[in-house]
């Protein structure tokens, strides 16, 4: 080896081991990939999907990565959630954008979800808080929750309600209403809220508990009737609609959308994503979008989201146990 070649090797080695080069290498390893996937375990058109796509459209400007939304549905969100949990994707290329009913209700409702909401994921950030609302077919002579209850008692078993699937909020809260009021409504589960809404609009199903973003356009067009918001406060987008809790105490349940990473994704990537989501939530166009959807920003980082996930697992687990509901 010539002296010149030896000198070149030493220079190359020195550069590669320099703090700057090492820093650039570490940064490359912990930067988000050029393309990432938001896996949504619910159908297109639902609130979770709507929120995921709104974030995906705005996120590239903040993180420099392309964001693709993919829906992988089944078993109330279990199929998609289990897919992400078992994917082994630790490079930041796949993220789960899900809702609290899948993370907190399903573990109590299903014998085997295929995933562990605590041990299989790293919580990243809250995205949006979404209020639920009971809507009715415009053909029915009801305008509020008292009317609904009275009509159901007058003709037991005559009326039906749709849900976005077994074990979802739209199922559980309506069963809570039935049990507390001693009424009989036939449950018709759908694969997502969109087909259920279609049948309520068409008069094939009488009632549906839906998220406000999924049905607000149909409320404003008069295609469905708003009955009651299942929240502790009225919905800013629908201020004239009463809250269900004023008629049936305890009939309360908000839906939230959040993002989780598979276990093993570097903390630096999780922090990048958290910061980007937090920044996005302060942008005027995102605030306008959320408001128009009847939603608000769900501002939570990893620590708060983990605590909230644990709290809701305990809360809804108790509700499911008391109701006796199970899904095989």
Image (spheres, rainbow, N blue to C red):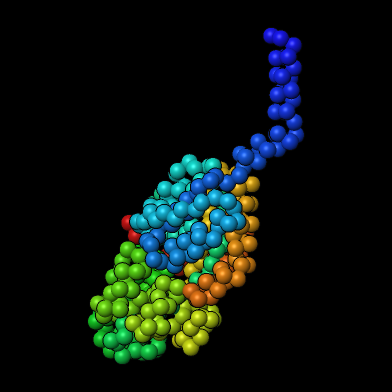
Q: Residue at x 40, y 75 (%)?
A: 215
Let me know if residue 221 appears in the view. Answer: yes
Q: Is residue 232 left or right of residue 225?
A: right
Q: Nearer the viewer, residue 8 or 165?
A: 8
For this orientation, the residue located farthest to the front is: 4
Q: Nearer the viewer, residue 189 or 41?
A: 41
In the rendered image of this protein, does residue 181 appear above or below residue 3?
below
Q: Residue at x 70, y 19 (%)?
A: 9
Give the quarter of the image for residue 277.
bottom right
Q: Nearer the viewer, residue 28 or 201?
A: 28
Q: Position of residue 113 (x, y in %)?
A: 40, 53
In the rendered image of this protein, does residue 155 appear above or below residue 19?
below
Q: Position of residue 74 (x, y in %)?
A: 35, 56
Image quarter where the C terminus lies is bottom left
Give the quarter of the image for residue 1.
top right
Let me know if residue 315 appears in the view. Answer: no
Q: Position of residue 6 (x, y in %)?
A: 72, 14
Q: Is residue 271 left or right of residue 121?
A: right
């Amino acid at each position: 080896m010539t002296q010149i070649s030896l000198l070149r090797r030493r220079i190359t080695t020195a550069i590669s081991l320099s703090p700057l080069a090492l820093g650039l290498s570490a940064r490359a390893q912990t930067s988000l990939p050029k393309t990432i996937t938001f896996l949504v375990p619910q159908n297109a058109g639902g609130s979770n999907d709507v929120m995921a796509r709104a974030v995906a459209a705005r996120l590239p400007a903040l993180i420099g990565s392309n964001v693709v939304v993919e829906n992988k549905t089944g078993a109330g969100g279990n199929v998609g959630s289990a897919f992400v949990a078992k994917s082994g994707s630790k490079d930041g290329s796949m993220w789960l954008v899900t809702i609290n009913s899948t993370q907190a209700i399903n573990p109590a409702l299903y014998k085997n979800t295929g995933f562990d909401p605590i041990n299989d994921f790293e919580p990243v950030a809250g995205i949006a808080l979404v209020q639920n609302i009971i809507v009715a077919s415009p053909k029915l002579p009801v305008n509020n929750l008292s009317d609904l209850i009275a009509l159901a008692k007058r003709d037991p078993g005559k009326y039906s309600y749709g849900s976005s699937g077994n074990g979802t909020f739209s199922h559980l809260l309506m069963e809570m209403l039935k049990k507390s009021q001693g009424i009989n409504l036939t449950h018709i589960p759908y694969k997502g809220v969109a087909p259920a809404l279609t049948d309520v609009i068409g008069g094939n199903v009488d009632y549906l508990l839906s998220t406000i973003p999924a049905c607000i356009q149909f409320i404003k067009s008069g295609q469905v009737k708003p009955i009651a918001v299942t929240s502790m406060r009225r919905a800013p987008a629908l201020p004239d609609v009463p809250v269900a809790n004023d008629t049936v105490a305890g009939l309360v349940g908000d839906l939230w959308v959040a993002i989780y990473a598979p276990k093993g994704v570097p903390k630096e990537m999780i922090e990048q994503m958290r910061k980007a989501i937090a920044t996005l939530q302060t942008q005027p166009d995102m605030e306008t979008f959320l408001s128009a959807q009847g939603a608000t920003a769900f501002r939570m980082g990893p620590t708060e989201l983990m605590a909230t996930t644990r709290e809701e697992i305990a809360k809804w687990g108790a509700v499911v146990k008391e109701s006796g509901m199970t899904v095989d």
